[in-house]
Image: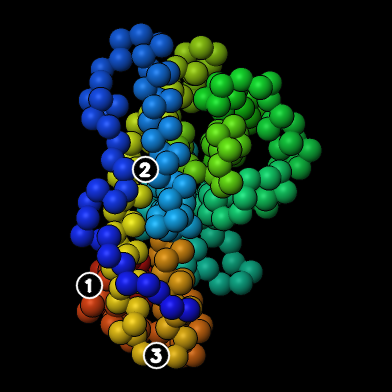
Amino acid sequence: MAYARATFIDDPDTLPRMPPWVTSARPETHEDVAFLSGAALAHLHLVVGRDDVPQALLRESLALRAAEACVVHSGRPERAADLRDALAFLQPGDSPGPAGESYLSWRRAVERPVAAKALNRALPTLEPEQIATWLEVVKAAPVTQAATVLEAVLGDRPRDFTSALILADATLAQALGWSHVLPLLALGLKRGDLRKTGEELRLICHQAIGTAAVETTHQAIDLTRRAARLKEAAPKLRARGSDKAVAHFLARDAIAPTALTSLRSDRAARRFCDRLVALGVARELTGRDTFRLYGV
């Protein structure tokens, strides 16, 4: 796999920035809130359609944040670092635990194009027919559809925050014509918001989506720069299988060296990761001497 030299990493204007009037406005009416969330979504739509944005990496990074939010809503103590460990070092046949299951569901939800079958893979405890029923909401504006699904799922499963938010964000993605789920409601809603219903819930969903769209745009810009630096360094990596290893880094939020099977041995994988860190294109994420994880 050959990587073209990335010439845009020093140009902060390559990706469109969120207009200041979207981020600094103080809405005073419901109409203002809906207008600003729509403007933020329209801008994010441009960003997620860009070929230079590492889409899989962005979605997985957002999935980690979404899972952490769901874990917090559930009152559990695990945070992002714990969720990374739960899946990165999971052995065949082992259970990742409740918090790890939430992260696994989010990762699976964002991996494949939006469809009832893919969502059932992410949420195996739900019946496919039930998922399809929830997704077949009355056609309305995208945020209204998502809020309707969120309220319906929580009405049936009051503490299943992961399922409710995945299906709500999936509904939003479908309504916007996006191919994959992009966690937004999960990032913007607080636990108290999830107790709201009707018009109050729709309003808070608009606010949450507007906030999350701005944050996601910033994250997309940051990850695009990081990915570009890694691609630029790729020709310096001489190890056999390094192309596949680089592709792995461009798709995963956190990687254990043992996952880089294209490098033929654990020792070669560890040396490869250390080389990326030395080149300034990857980070060690745990601060540990053993059981390390790396990401761009």
Please report contact status of discs 3 and 2: CB closer than 8 Å, yes or no. Answer: no
Identify the residue at horizontal 43%, vertical 25% (top origin): 38
Check residue 280 in the rendering and tell me which mark sits there, or answer none.
Answer: 1
Left or right, 133 with respect to 119, comes to right
Identify the residue at horizontal 30%, vertical 15% (top origin): 27
The one of 50 and 220 positioned closer to us in this rendering = 50
Which circle's residue, 1 or 3, is located before the other in the chain? Answer: 3
- 30 versus 277 height, above or below: above
Which circle's residue, 1 or 2, is located before the other in the chain? Answer: 2
Identify the residue at horizontal 72%, vertical 48% (top origin): 117
Residue type at mark 2 is Thr
- Tell me if I can see residue 26 in this picture: yes
Please report contact status of discs 1 and 2: CB closer than 8 Å, yes or no. Answer: no
Left or right, 27 with respect to 127, comes to left
Kindly report the distance in space between the C-alpha atoms of the residues bearing marks 3 and 2. 34 Å
Circle 3 Cα neighbour tier, 10 Å, few/some/many (<14 / 14–19 / ≥20): some
How has the structure been colored for display?
Answer: rainbow
Residue type at mark 3 is Ala
Circle 2 Cα neighbour tier, 10 Å, few/some/many (<14 / 14–19 / ≥20): many
In percent of width and height, residue 291 lies at 37, 75
